[in-house]
Amino acid sequence: MKIAFFGLGHMGGPMAANLLKAGHELSVFDLQPALVDALAAQGAMAVQSPVDAVADADVVISMLPSGKAVASLYLGDKGVLAHIPQGALIIDCSTIDAATAKQVAQAAEASGRRMIDAPVSGGVAGAAAGTLTFICGGSAEDVQRAEPVLLQMGKKVFRAGDHGAGQTAKLCNNMLLAIHMIGTCEALQLGADHGLDPKVLSDIMLASSGRNWSLELYNPWPGVMENVPASRDYAGGFAVNLMNKDLGLALEAALSSGSSTPMGSLAKSLYAVHGSQGHGQLDFSSIQQFFAKRS
Ligand code: NAD
């Protein structure tokens, strides 16, 4: 298939690389030329403009940082929507607000094109390994049509409901992720402050009722696990700024439905302080440093 891929960052880069490995023809575009060059070196076609990328595309995929970026890529005078071939399927994998996801999908469908939101879970390691979970919103038919391509970048595809529902489900997940990451950090710090070895404490909690994804697969204490951001000075991974964005979206969603999310609100405040202290580009597990004792 001919696939146009927009956004080649921490997630989009390895996702696009997996589609190349699966034998697809890829046209790639990112605002950062170095990221385009890296994919071109793996066999993708580098294009001069977003419009060039979508010519003849069967599938268009975007993996962008915000709803604003998604709306500006597809909509308006300079948007690519009008240039996407009729019959192509558009898959937005970015994590954005459900309202923008619905707005762009409705514009796509009004112009005779099909679109789904398909935000992902699984992180940078999952993107590289091709083990992501896709959480889709859109018609059952379109999600079914997207599935073969999505399964070349991931292992599971869920349909949460209609347009925007994938985003809502993703925000619920990320709010919970922020909460258990912070809880994991404070428990490890408390143990360490009382002389426990964080690795031993992690093993104990993993075999006990405190077990959770952050502890098991993404341990935030440096050196406890190999190949996680904590063991490389919190570089790479899922940035504090992006977690902050997702928590903001979750709180906006809670406001619109009158839902009570006290733990999510506290997590948002803690991530906002952590980001404002100059840690915005670090991985979100760096919130461990927020609890660290400084002499
Ligand atoms: P990133 O900042 O590394 O990558 C985003 C890329 O989009 C950048 O390279 C940027 O230059 C590019 N970009 C921005 N506007 C563009 C445009 N108009 N056209 C083309 N390219 C454009 O971010 P990331 O970590 O790859 O995250 C991407 C999305 O995936 C976000 O919505 C994030 O919330 C979500 N996500 C990230 C993770 C993670 O672990 N990093 C996990 C799940 C979901």
Image (cartoon, rainbow, N blue to C red):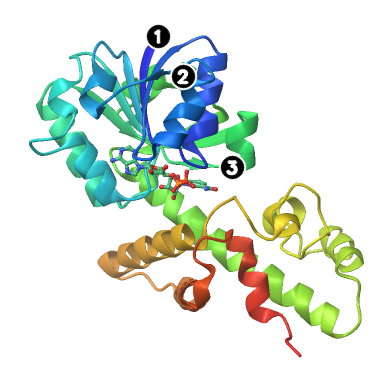
**Residue 1 numbered mark, or none:** 1
Q: Secondary structure at mark 1?
A: loop
Between tags 2 and 1, which lies in front? 1
Is 36 on the left or on the right of 153, as rendered?
left
Camera-nearest residue between 247 and 21: 21
Question: Residue 75: x, y in percent?
Answer: 15, 38
**Residue 124 numbered mark, or none:** 3
Which residue is at 44% across, 75% downward?
A: 265
Give the mark nearer the N terminus: 1 vs 3.
1
Which residue is at 23% across, 50% downward?
A: 99
Q: Quadrant of ligand 1?
A: top left
Question: Residue 65: x, y in percent?
Answer: 38, 48
Camera-nearest residue between 53 and 65: 53
Crowding near the residue tagged with mark 1, few <14, some 14–19, many ≥20 C-alpha atoms within 10 Å: few
Q: Amino acid at mark 1?
A: Met
Q: Which quadrant of the view contains residue 122?
A: top right
Crowding near the residue tagged with mark 3, few <14, some 14–19, many ≥20 C-alpha atoms within 10 Å: many
Question: Residue 230: x, y in percent?
Answer: 71, 59
Visible in this render: residue 159?
no
Q: Label 2 near label 3: C-beta < 8 Å?
A: no
Determine if the C-beta at disc 3 is less than 8 A from ligand 1: yes
**Residue 149 numbered mark, or none:** 2
